C-alpha cells in the first residue's frame, strides 16, 4: 500500500537504520528502484521534485508508483522533494502523495516556521506527513542556488523551537552534505559534522532526522562515464561509512538521486560506445534499469541497513 513515513521512521529510529529516499522521474527508474527494494523486502520512499513532476506529469508518476506497489507488494511512501510553496505541497497532497517536504530553509527563521506550519496544518488534516528543513546545504537545491560560502550548518539551539512550533514530522538538517556530484573540493577530506547531528539529537530525542545530498558518487562509475565520452572531472560524494554511521543514529531518511543518475548514465554511455549500431531504446534502457537496481540494492544492504525491515 501507499503509506506515510510514520511507522517506517519509528522502526528505523529504534532499529538504528535508515530508509532510502530515491528520486524518480520515469518508468525505468521506478522499476529499477522498486525491483531492488521488493526483492530485499526493504521499506521505501520514492520522491518527486518539482522539476520531476513538471517533466513526467503528476498522473504518470502516481500511476507508475501504484503499479510498483501492485508488482512488489511493498509499503511505499510517495513524497514531494523540496516543495517550495504551500500551493505545490497542497497540489501533491490533494493528488495522493502521502508525504511532502516544505523547503523554506533559505527563508528567515520566522518565515520558515510560518510557511511550514501552514503546510503541516493542511497536510495533517488529510493524513499526510511533512518534512521541513533548517540550515542551508551547499550546492544546488532544485532551482535555488546556494553558494558554498552561504552554506550554514543547522543551529542545534533552533531545532526544538522549530519542531514544536511547526508540528513537522521530520527535519532535514545541514551537516556538510550537498546536492549533486561535486560535493567537496578534490583533495580535501569529506567529513560530515557528527557533532552537529548529535547536538540536534539531544534537543529532539526520538525525532526522525533527514539527510539530503547523500550520494556517494562512486569513483568506478565516474571513471566509466569519463571513459565512454563523459566529462565529470573531480566528481566526489559522501563516503559511505559516514552515511552508515548516520543511519545508526537519528537519521531515518537518506536522500539519493545523483548516484542513480550516475549509474544510469554510465550504463547508457558504455552501451552506446560498445554498440554503436543499436537504436532500439530498449537495448540501452534495459541495462540502465539494471544498473539502477544494482545501485539501490547496494545502498539498501551496505549503507541503509533496511533490508528485511
Ligand atoms: O535535490 C534535488 C534532487 O536531486 C532533484 O533534482 O530538481 O533536478 O529534479 P531535480
Ligand atoms: P544527491 O544529489 O546527493 O543524490 O541528493 C539528492 C537529494 O537530496 C534529493 O533531495
Ligand atoms: Zn535534497
Ligand atoms: Na537511523
Image (spheres, rainbow, N blue to C red):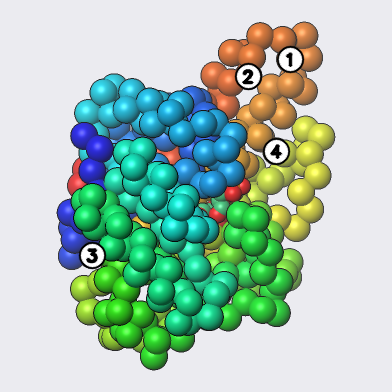
* Residue under pointer 2: 284
Q: Are marks 4 and 2 in contact (CB under 8 Å)?
A: no
In three-dimensional space, the C-alpha distance between marks 2 and 3, rounded to whole angstroms, equals 39 Å
* Residue under pointer 4: 224
Q: Are marks 2 and 1 in contact (CB under 8 Å)?
A: yes
Classify the position of the N terminus by image quarter: top left
Q: Upstream in the sequence, badge 2 or badge 1?
A: 1
* Residue under pointer 1: 275
Residue at left offset 58%, top offset 80%: 152
Q: Residues within 10 Å of mark 1 (few under 14, many from 20)?
A: few
Q: Upstream in the sequence, badge 3 or badge 1?
A: 3
Q: Residues within 10 Å of mark 3 (few under 14, many from 20)?
A: many
Q: Is mark 3 within 8 Å of ligand 4?
A: yes
Residue at left offset 81%, top offset 34%: 229
Which percent across, then down, holds residue 177? 55, 67
What label does residue 13 carry, if any?
Answer: 3
Which percent across, then down, holds residue 60? 45, 26
In three-dimensional space, the C-alpha distance between marks 4 and 3, rounded to whole angstroms, equals 36 Å
Q: Upstream in the sequence, badge 4 or badge 1?
A: 4
Secondary element type, mark 1: loop
User: Hey, which residue is sitting farthest bottom in the picture?
Assistant: 157
In three-dimensional space, the C-alpha distance between marks 4 and 1, rounded to whole angstroms, equals 15 Å
Amino acid at each position: 500500500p501507499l503509506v506515510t513515513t510514520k511507522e517506517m521512521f519509528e522502526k528505523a529510529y529504534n532499529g538504528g537504520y535508515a530508509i532510502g529516499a530515491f528520486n524518480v522521474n520515469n518508468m525505468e527508474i521506478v522499476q529499477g528502484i522498486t525491483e531492488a527494494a521488493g526483492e530485499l523486502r526493504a521499506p521505501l520512499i520514492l520522491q518527486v521534485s518539482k522539476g520531476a513532476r513538471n517533466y513526467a506529469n503528476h498522473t504518470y508518476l502516481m500511476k507508475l508508483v501504484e503499479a510498483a506497489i501492485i508488482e512488489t507488494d511493498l509499503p511505499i511512501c510517495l513524497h514531494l522533494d523540496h516543495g517550495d510553496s504551500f500551493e505545490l505541497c497542497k497540489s501533491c497532497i490533494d493528488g495522493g502523495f502521502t508525504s511532502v517536504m516544505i523547503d523554506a530553509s533559505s527563508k528567515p527563521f520566522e518565515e520558515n516556521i510560518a510557511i511550514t506550519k501552514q503546510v503541516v496544518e493542511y497536510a495533517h488534516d488529510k493524513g499526510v506527513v511533512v518534512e521541513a528543513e533548517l540550515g542551508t546545504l551547499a550546492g544546488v537545491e532544485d532551482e535555488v542556488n546556494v553558494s558554498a560560502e552561504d552554506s550554514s550548518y543547522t543551529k542545534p539551539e533552533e531545532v526544538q523551537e522549530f519542531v514544536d512550533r511547526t508540528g513537522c514530522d521530520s527535519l532535514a538538517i545541514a551537516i556538510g552534505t550537498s546536492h549533486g556530484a561535486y560535493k567537496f573540493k578534490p583533495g580535501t577530506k569529506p567529513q560530515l559534522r557528527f557533532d552537529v547531528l548529535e547536538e540536534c539529537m539531544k534537543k529532539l530525542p526520538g525525532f526522525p532526522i533527514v539527510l539530503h545530498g547523500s550520494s556517494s558518487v562512486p569513483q568506478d562509475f565516474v571513471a566509466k562515464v569519463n571513459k565512454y565520452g563523459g566529462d565529470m572531472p573531480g566528481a566526489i560524494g559522501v563516503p559511505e561509512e559516514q552515511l552508515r554511521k548516520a543511519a545508526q543514529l537519528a537519521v531515518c531518511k537518506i536522500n539519493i538521486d545523483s548516484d542513480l543518475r550516475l549509474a544510469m548514465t554510465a550504463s547508457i554511455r558504455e552501451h552506446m560506445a560498445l554498440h554503436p549500431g543499436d537504436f532500439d531504446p530498449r537495448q540501452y534502457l534495459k541495462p540502465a534499469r539494471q544498473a539502477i537496481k544494482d545501485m539501490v540494492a547496494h545502498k539498501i544492504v551496505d549503507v541503509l541497513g533496511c533490508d528485511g525491515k
